[in-house]
DNA sequence: TGAATTGTTATCGT
DNA sequence: AACGATAACAATTC
C-alpha cells in the first residue's frame, strides 16, 4: 500500500535510471487504467525524453521534453519492475529475477521501453492503479492538497486546513484534497506521535496540539523515507519502517511510550490503531454550531 | 469466505 | 445549500 514514503523511495530508485532516457515504446495490457487511452498515450509519449522524475502526493510524475506529464498512481498494489531488453527483444528482469529471468513479472499491466535497452514494467495485482498522460499538469493535479514535506506546509498552514472544517482528524488527514500523500499507516502513526485521538474534531485543536500534529506528520514521513518505507507484504519489499511503527499493525501489543495495550477501532471504514492512554478520546460535550468557530 | 486495502463518486443526513 | 459522513465500487490476495 504505497503511501508518500514508499512512492518517494520508488522515485529515488528509478530517477537515475529514467532521467535523460527517451521512451521508444509503450504498451498497456489493461487499457482501462490508462488515460486518455493506451493508444493515445503511446502516440503522445513515444519519442519523448524524460527530463525529470519526481513525486507529487502519491503520484510518480514524469516530466517529458514537450512539456507534457505522465502520472503514475500505484493505488493499492501497483509496483515497478526493471528489466533489460536484449537484441532479440527478450526482456530480462533483474529486480527480483524470475527462474529464467525472462517471463513478464506477475500482474504486468504496462511497460515502457527506453533508448538504452531497459524496460520499465508497471505491475498491479488489483488493477486499481492509474497511468495518466496530461498536457495540463496544473489542471490534472488541481484537486490535490498540501504537500506535507514542503516548506509551505507550516504549522499555520495546517491550522488553517484544520479550522476551515469540522471533521474527525483521521478522515480529514486521509483526504488527499486536504493533505496529500498520507495513507492509513502514516495517519495512525502521526496521530499517535502527536498524542491525538483519530475521532477528535479538527476545529477543536489548541495551538500546541496543532504544532505537535504538524511536527509528528513530518517526523514520521521523514523517518519512513529514511527507512525506505514500510514493507508488509510482497507488494512492496525492502522497506524497514515496519520495525519502527508505534501503533499500525500492533493491536494488542504494548505502547512503546506508555505500555498500554494498542487498540484497533474502525473510523470511517478504516482500521485505526490507537493507544488508549496516549490518545484520549475527545469528550462530546462542547458541540459548537456552525458560525461559532473561532479564527485567529 | 470475508476482510482488507485506495481514492473517487454518489447519496444521505444535518 | 453546503458540508460532512457513509456506502458503493474497482479487483485480488490470504
Image (cartoon, coloured by chain):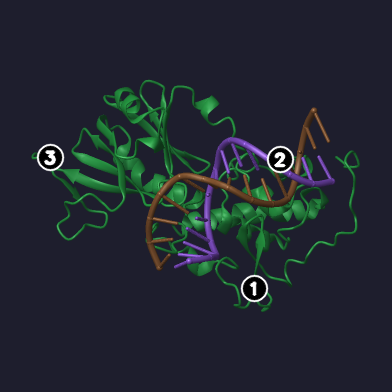
Chain colours: A green, B purple, C brown
Q: Residues within 10 Å of mark 1 (few under 14, many from 20)?
A: many
Q: CA distance from mark 1 to mark 2?
A: 31 Å
Circle 3 marks a residue in which chain? A
Left or right, A15 with reference to A249: left
Tag 3–tag 1 contact (CB < 8 Å)? no
Circle 2 marks a residue in which chain? A
Check residue A262 in the rendering and tell me which mark sits there, or answer none. Answer: 1
Residue at the (30%, 49%) spot, across then down: A81
Q: CA distance from mark 3 to mark 2?
A: 51 Å
Mark 1 element type: loop
**Depicted A286 relative to depicted A143: above or below:** below
**Depicted A111 relative to depicted A212: above or below:** above
| Residue that numbered label 3 is attached to | A89
Q: Residues within 10 Å of mark 3 (few under 14, many from 20)?
A: few
Mark 2 element type: helix
Residue A177 percent location from the top left of the image: 63, 39
Residue closest to the far left: A88
| Residue that numbered label 2 is attached to | A157
User: Is residue A154 or residue A138 the one in the foreground?
Assistant: A138
- The tag earlier along the polypeptide, 1 or 2, is 2
Residue at the (79%, 43%) spot, across then down: A163
Residues at marks 3 and 1 on the same chain: yes
Mark 3 element type: loop
- The tag earlier along the polypeptide, 3 or 1, is 3
Q: Quadrant of residue A51?
A: top left
Circle 1 marks a residue in which chain? A
Check residue A121 in the rendering and tell me which mark sits there, or answer none. Answer: none
Left or right, A219 with reference to A88: right
Q: Quadrant of residue A116?
A: top left
Q: Nearer the viewer, mark 1 or mark 2?
A: 1
- The tag earlier along the polypeptide, 3 or 2, is 3
Tag 3–tag 2 contact (CB < 8 Å)? no
Amino acid at each position: 500500500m504505497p503511501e508518500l514514503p514508499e512512492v518517494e523511495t520508488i522515485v529515488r530508485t528509478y530517477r537515475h535510471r529514467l532521467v535523460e532516457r527517451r521512451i521508444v515504446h509503450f504498451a498497456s495490457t489493461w487499457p482501462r487504467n490508462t488515460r486518455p487511452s493506451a493508444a493515445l498515450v503511446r502516440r503522445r509519449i513515444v519519442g519523448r525524453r524524460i527530463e525529470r522524475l519526481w513525486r507529487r502526493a502519491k503520484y510518480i510524475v514524469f516530466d517529458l521534453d514537450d512539456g507534457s506529464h505522465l502520472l503514475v498512481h500505484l493505488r493499492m498494489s501497483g509496483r515497478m519492475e526493471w528489466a533489460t531488453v536484449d537484441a532479440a527483444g527478450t526482456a530480462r528482469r533483474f529486480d527480483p529475477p524470475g527462474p529464467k529471468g525472462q517471463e513478464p513479472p506477475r500482474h504486468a499491466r504496462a511497460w515502457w521501453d527506453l533508448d538504452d535497452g531497459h524496460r520499465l514494467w508497471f505491475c498491479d495485482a488489483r488493477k486499481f492503479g492509474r497511468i495518466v498522460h496530461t498536457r495540463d499538469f496544473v489542471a490534472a493535479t488541481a484537486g490535490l492538497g498540501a504537500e506535507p514535506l514542503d516548506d509551505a506546509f507550516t504549522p499555520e498552514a495546517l491550522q488553517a486546513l484544520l479550522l476551515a472544517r469540522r471533521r474527525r482528524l483521521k478522515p480529514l488527514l486521509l483526504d488527499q484534497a486536504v493533505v496529500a500523500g498520507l495513507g492509513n499507516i502514516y495517519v495512525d502513526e502521526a496521530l499517535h506521535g502527536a498524542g491525538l485521538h483519530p475521532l477528535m474534531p479538527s476545529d477543536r485543536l489548541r495551538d500546541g496540539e496543532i504544532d505537535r500534529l504538524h511536527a509528528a506528520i513530518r517526523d514520521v514521513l521523514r523517518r519512513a523515507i529514511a527507512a525506505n518505507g514500510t514493507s508488509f507484504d510482497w507488494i512492496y519489499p525492502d522497506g524497514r519502517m515496519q520495525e519502527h511503527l508505534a501503533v499500525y499493525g500492533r493491536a494488542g501489543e504494548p505502547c512503546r511510550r506508555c505500555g498500554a495495550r494498542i487498540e484497533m477501532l474502525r473510523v470511517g471504514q478504516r482500521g485505526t490503531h490507537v493507544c488508549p492512554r496516549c490518545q484520549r478520546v475527545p469528550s462530546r460535550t462542547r458541540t459548537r454550531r456552525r458560525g461559532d468557530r473561532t479564527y485567529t
